[in-house]
Amino acid sequence: MKLALTADWHGMLPNSVPACEAVIIAGDLAIDGPGQLNWLNYKFPAWLEIHVPVGVPVYLTWGNHDFTQGKLRGEIEGNWPPCVFCVVDDWHPIGGKKVWFSPWSPKFLNWAWMEAEDRLAERFKLIPDDVDVIVSHAPPLGAGDSLGRDGPKYGLPAGTRVGSKALTECIGERLSKLGMVICGHIHED
């Protein structure tokens, strides 16, 4: 199965979607700020109609810039075409594979979909042992999680690793079955 994998659009919609059988977005879909709800309700669905071929499903989870928690999720997702599946703390079958979706990241500043590591460990315990793929907004600790030059911007030394230890442990427990982990969040790495 050919997939288009992406994350961290932050409202910047691509001009095209490569030929694929499904699109997976690992969080941080929308613009920041007060226009986010409007962007999610109108701009994103309009883009889908133009750029995603009929019959190609789009699977996504949220990220730390997607302030969609609570009652807003129903308002937003209810306006999307039926080919879009927003999955949070659950799995969905894609191409015969069991794919788990998690919007959560380790707590940092005051952004959305963030938890302390002990709470993340509880959330990741929900992931069935037989999943084939994990789509997580946050990367696991030690893989794709280095802040690089952006570290000082957040008051941390360059090269600081900010991935989830709980996710790393979850992945380790499932290595015999797990085929892939898809994540975003840390743009530099």
Image (cartoon, rainbow, N blue to C red):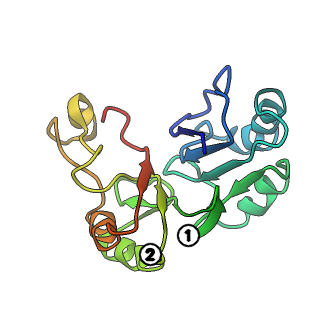
Residue 155 horizontal/vertical position (percent): 21, 41
Mark 1 and mark 2 in contact? Answer it, CB < 8 Å: yes
Marked residue nearer the N-terminal end (1 or 2): 1
Query: Residue at (47%, 60%) from the top-left corner?
Result: 134
**Quadrant of the drawing holding the C terminus:** top left
Going 35% across and 60% down the picture, which residue do you hit? 106
**Residue 90, position as x, y percentages in the image:** 59, 70
Say which amino acid is labelled 1.
Asp
Task: Identify the image quadrant of residue 48.
Answer: top right
- Residue 120 is left or right of residue 37, and the answer is left
Q: Amino acid at mark 2?
A: Arg
Q: Residue under circle 2?
A: 123
The residue to which callout 1 is attached is 89
Residue 112 percent coordinates (x, y): 51, 56
Q: Horizontally, is 78 left or right of 62 in the view? A: right
Q: Secondary structure at mark 2?
A: helix
